[in-house]
Image (spheres, rainbow, N blue to C red):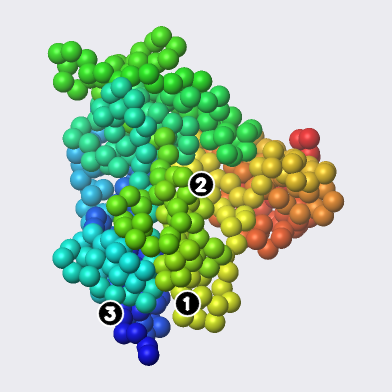
Amino acid sequence: MTLKFDYDLFVIGAGSGGVRAARMAASKGKKVAVAEERYLGGTCVNVGCVPKKLFVYASQFPELFHASKGYGWSIPGQPSLDWATLRDNKTTEIERLNAIYNNLIDNSGAELFSARATVVGPHQVAVEDKVYSAKVILIATGGWPYIPEFPGSELAISSNEMFFLDQLPKTAVVVGGGYIAVEFAGILNGLGVETHLVYRGPELLKSFDREMSGKIVEGMSNKGVHIHLNTQINEIVKVAGRDRELSVVLDNGGNLTAGLALYATGRQANTAGLGLENTAVVMGNNGSIVVDNHFATAEPSIYALGDVIDRVQLTPVAIQEAMVLVDHLYGDGQAQIDYSDIPTAVFCQPEFGTVGLSEEQARAEYADIAVYLSDFKPMLQTLGGGAERITMKLVVDNESDRVLGCHMVGEHAAEIIQGLGIALKAGATKAHFDATVGIHPSAAEEFVTMRERAR
């Protein structure tokens, strides 16, 4: 006897991965439901990469205003920022994207529940006061900022709240050493906030190429960010008589007075209260869901993908995972995902783009490598009078001549590295790079004109 289900697929979470899975499954004639309790588009669209990039653009204008003088432009008076205009225009754009996601779901034929959904059994999902049955349940609930508990931790905010501040503080303390921390430090600094970046370790962006991370630290410092390494926060207290001021007490005996303390100390899988204890789903110590190569959990009817499985926390990766999953469930099962050589950008200032192996990773995996390096002042700065530089790096396996890694710190790094990501996927060699004619004058041409080994 064949069981009758309300839905073929019930997706919990309408972020990029969940929406892509729902749309693709619906296009194959499946009856699909999507439940989302907060906002359509997930973290990336609402409190992640999209609004963050808009804020990055906003924070870069002071340097452009400065550079324009060398090109003959004069700006009467001193440019000033209206924070409320930036914040509210950002919100209007996000609401436009929310509507697009809503239309995508509606047009696909999937049914949308704008409410919290919980799992009550291997094939049951509860939404508000009703329980629905589904042949397959997909968990795509993403991640959530993590702030450790310590005296005064309730006074700190996460990246979620950064996009909706009533007003900008004069001074801010950003805590963390990963990409979210360095990005927001750059944003706040560029918007005119005196910014202190505090990290407990000796190096920022420690998972990336060490030399390039060093260039980022140097560039951030040159732009005015105060960086405190090997430093921890002992306590945050309100300053007496000053409603919006905090005293951030450091473990070295010092303290920083600031109007805002932003903790960017990691994200955790958003699985709390989801009801997975009612199933055989296995979770890791950090709350992430354990899945196999087909994104199946230990419960045969439940799958998971995206940030909630804590593999590669990037929006394009979640979308790719969704396409592979739908092919596995409803297609010919041939689609696969390759987590190697994924191009990545950190929208810090200076900007960082990378694909492939760092120099450290390459030295650990290959017996004989060559490193090519170029460091120069970008053309804009020749008349603009700025101090920013660009650093580019190629890591090559000498035995096969294959390019193992491409790294760039400086303007337009993300745009340039995207194209090099294709080259690495195709297995390009250093000879291919050397044989490619550069676009002149451009920064990107340096990647095909590096001939002398740095080491």
Which quadrant would residue 68 be assigned to in this image? top left
Residue 411 or residue 210, whichever sits in front? 210
Kind of residue at badge 3:
Asp
Which quadrant would residue 132 be assigned to in this image? bottom left
Verify CB contact (< 8 Å) between mark 1 and mark 3.
Answer: no
Gap between marks 2 and 3, in whole Å? 42 Å
Residue at 29% from the left image edge and 38% from the top image edge: 162
Verify CB contact (< 8 Å) between mark 2 and mark 1.
Answer: no
Which quadrant would residue 168 be assigned to in this image? top left
Query: Mark 1 — residue?
Result: 329
Indicate the quadrant containing the C terminus: top left, top right, bottom left or bottom right.
top right
Q: Nearer the viewer, mark 1 or mark 3?
A: 3
Residue 435 or residue 177, whichever sits in front? 177
Query: Mark 2 — residue?
Result: 345
Work out which residue is located at the far top of the displayed protein and give it.
Answer: 253
Q: Secondary structure at mark 1?
A: helix
Q: Secondary structure at mark 3?
A: loop
Q: Earlier in the sequence, mark 1 or mark 3?
A: 3
Query: Mark 3 — residue?
Result: 6
Residue at 79% from the left image edge and 43% from the top image edge: 369
Kind of residue at badge 1:
Leu
Kind of residue at badge 2:
Ala
Give x and y (percent) for residue 197.
42, 25
Gap between marks 2 and 1, in whole Å? 32 Å
Indicate the quadrant containing the N terminus: top left, top right, bottom left or bottom right.
bottom left
